[in-house]
Structures are given as C-alpha cells and as structure tokens.
Image: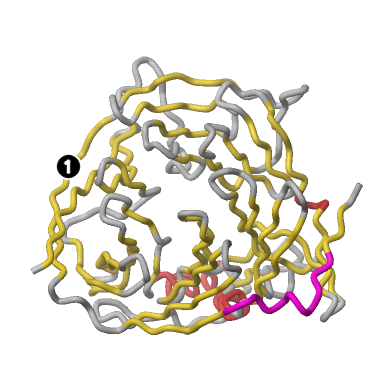
C-alpha cells in the first residue's frame, strides 16, 4: 500500500535555525603529513575497478571494505588490516534473496554489518552473507506539502543513519524539472517525517547543463550535493559552495556555516550555457564548469575530533592543460575553520576514508587495487 506522508506547514520550519560565518584561521594549528602507497593482495582474483570503487564502502570499525560489481552482483570484501582479499559473496539477482536492479547509485555499510544497496526506486538491505534482510520501497513515499499542494518524492541523493533507523533524502518534484525544496528525514519504523526546507538545491540548479541534440533523449549534468550522517547528525554540503549545513536530529535544529577561503574560490560561477545542442558546445560548457573550484564531502577524523574537507581549484595552465591544486581544510567539532593547506604532489582523492588516523584514497595501479595513505601530524603552538 502506498504511504502518503503529509507535511504540515507548521512543521515545515524546523525548531531552530542559525547562520554562522567562519573566516579566521587558527594560526596556532599546525599540520604536516607523510604519504605512502600500499597494494592489496588479490590472490587469484581480479578486483572490479572499472568504476573506481564508486560502489564501495567501509565498515564502521574500518576493518573491511566492500566493493560491488554491478554487472555480476559479486561483492568483494577486503581486509584492510591485512590488505588482502578476505572473501567474495555472490549476491542473487532473482529469487527470495534477489537484489537485481537496472542501476545502483551507491552502497552503504551499516553498523550491524548489513549493507544498503541504493537504487533509483528502492534500497535493498542485505547481510554480509548475501541474504536479503528487507527492501525499502522509495516510490511508496509520496510526500505532499500542504502549503504548496505539490506532490514530491524521494530523490537520488539518499543516506541511512548508521543504525539504519533514519532515511535522509532530497526531495524531487514528480516532473524532475523543478529543484528540490529541501530534504526529509524519515523514521523508517514509524514513518514519521521531518521536512527541512533549504535553498541549496535551488541554487545548485543554475549549474545544470542540458545537452539536447535533435530528437535524441536529453542528457543533464550538474553539481553534487552530499548527505552524510556523522555521530547521528546529518551533514549537508555541495561541490559548488564553501559552506555546510548541520542538522541535529535530537534537537530538530539546523545550523548553516559559511566559510571564507584564501587558497580557493568560495563558489562556482555560471560562465557557461545551461542548454547546449552539439558535442562541441557540451565539451566547452563542461570544461568551463570543471575548471572551477570543486568542494568534496566533509569527513571526520575521530582520533582528533576534527572535520576534513578536500577541494580542488585551477592553479595554472601549461599549454592547453589545466593544472589543479588540491587543498585540505580543517574544522573543529563546531565547524570553526582551523586551517587551509595545499597538498603538494598528491594525487586526486577517490573514495577517501579514515583508518587508524590515516586518510586512505583509492588508486588503480596497472589494474590492481591500491591506496595512497596520508598520515597527518597535528600540533598546537
């Protein structure tokens, strides 16, 4: 049965919201680092690396990495302590444990070891042994905002809390033509909902590029938005803006922090058309957008109780090639900016995660799975 979740205008504005700016760095905060590269022993197995670990996640104790091959539904499990393949699990496409979907956007490992497989219309939860635990039917949630009389649904950008009890997602209009007006946080056991209005997604709409040539189906690209539960609070940010939203699930309050960078720009600008009609126009528009600053997702280093955010920006040109600089920015637990620092001679970050106080980043070395590890040293003077 379809579940309609009605959001009353009275709760459309959450209990408390605040705007804060962070400009000054803490000059006493010092950061240095060393790096190394480690290989993962695959034995006789060949890891699925075609999509750069885009369908992977790390267990909450940081001991195991799970990587899904979406073509064969083979789940590869890597022991991160020993840096070797632990085992593979064949997931079933059909049948009582079937998880066959035409497309998966991401996977997420929950604190109990179960794995969420995120598709467009449903999320399958499976055990590490490949048994189907439950399925969350996203198209059953049709959310009607009584203020605007519009029916909306769960969008592509979704995340579960570590315990699997909360689902947070952007909202999209049923025609996909208008941007999300905010996010929802749903308690899956009771279907109770919190609607959090935000203008972020409307602001990101300006960076979409629609490629339409003749009668062929259109293709659209845009900027990324990031949702992540950290310590049971929801962190929301984007690739286009130097800010972050922090939703406290306990107090039902939203805080917005904006920052002023000195090593990168603070936001993307729209210096390209939103609609293109040829391959050259598409290439030129994407080039203009991608040469600008891009902010990555916020990560938390538990050992230091600080947040990291990595970003890239155009540094200089060598002939017709763009040279990008990579910048690490650090924030305390209250999102006060502590320091920015350019990372020298470091490769592009892909699927980064922390383990044992080090930042791991995937790298493909001759079709073998490897990680570049950044070991930080912090001090206050």
Q: Nearer the viewer, residue 268 or 237?
A: 237
**Count of labels in the image:** 1
Rendered image quadrant of residue 218? bottom right
**Magenta stretch contains residue 9:** yes
Magenta span of residues = 6-16
Image height of 25 relative to 222, above or below: below
Q: Is residue 91 above or below residue 20?
A: above
Residue at x 20%, y 39% (from the top left corner):
37
- Residue situated in front as seen by the camera: 351 or 18: 18
Residue 27 place in picture, x, y as percent: 14, 76
Residue positioned 20% across, 67% down in the render: 342
Could you say which quadrant of the image residue 114 lies in?
A: top right
Q: How is the image coloured?
A: secondary structure
- Residue of label 1: 36
Image vertical order of residue 206 relative to residue 166, above or below: below
Q: Residue at x 37, y 70 (%)?
A: 334
Q: Residues within 10 Å of mark 1 (few under 14, many from 20)?
A: few
As for residue 11 lying within the magenta part, the answer is yes
């Amino acid at each position: 049965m379809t579940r309609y979740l009605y959001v009353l205008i009275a709760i459309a504005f959450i209990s408390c919201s605040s705007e804060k700016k962070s400009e000054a760095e803490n000059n006493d905060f010092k950061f240095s680092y060393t790096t190394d590269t480690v290989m993962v022993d695959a034995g006789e197995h060949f890891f699925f690396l075609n999509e750069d670990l885009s369908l992977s996640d790390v267990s909450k104790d940081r001991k195991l990495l799970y990587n899904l091959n979406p073509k064969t539904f083979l789940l590869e499990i890597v022991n991160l302590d020993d840096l070797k393949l632990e085992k593979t699990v064949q997931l079933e496409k059909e049948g009582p444990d079937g998880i066959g979907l035409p497309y998966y956007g991401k996977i997420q490992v929950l604190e109990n070891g179960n794995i969420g497989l995120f598709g467009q219309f449903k999320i399958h939860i499976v055990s590490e042994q490949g048994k189907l635990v439950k399925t969350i039917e996203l198209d059953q949630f049709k959310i009607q905002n009584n203020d605007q009389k519009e029916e909306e649904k769960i969008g592509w950008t979704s995340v579960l809390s570590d315990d699997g009890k909360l689902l947070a997602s952007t909202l999209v209009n049923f025609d996909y033509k208008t941007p999300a007006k905010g996010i929802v946080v749903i308690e899956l056991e009771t279907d109770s909902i919190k609607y959090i209005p935000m203008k972020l997604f409307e602001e990101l709409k300006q960076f979409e590029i629609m490629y339409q040539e003749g009668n062929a189906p259109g293709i659209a690209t845009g900027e990324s938005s990031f949702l992540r539960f950290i310590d049971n609070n929801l962190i929301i940010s984007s690739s286009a803006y130097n800010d972050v939203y922090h939703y406290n699930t306990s107090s039902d309050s939203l805080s917005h922090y904006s920052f002023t960078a000195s090593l990168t720009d603070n936001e993307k600008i729209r210096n390209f058309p939103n609609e293109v009609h040829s391959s050259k126009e598409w290439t030129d528009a994407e080039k203009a957008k991608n040469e600008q600053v891009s902010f990555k997702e916020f990560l938390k280093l538990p050992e230091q109780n600080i947040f990291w955010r990595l970003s890239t920006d155009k540094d200089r040109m060598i002939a017709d090639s763009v040279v990008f600089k990579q910048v690490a920015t650090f924030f305390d637990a209250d999102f006060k900016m502590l320091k920015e620092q350019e990372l020298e001679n470091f490769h592009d970050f892909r699927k980064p995660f922390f383990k044992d106080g080090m930042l791991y980043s995937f790298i493909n070395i001759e079709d073998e799975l490897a990680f570049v590890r950044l070991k930080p040293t912090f001090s206050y003077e």
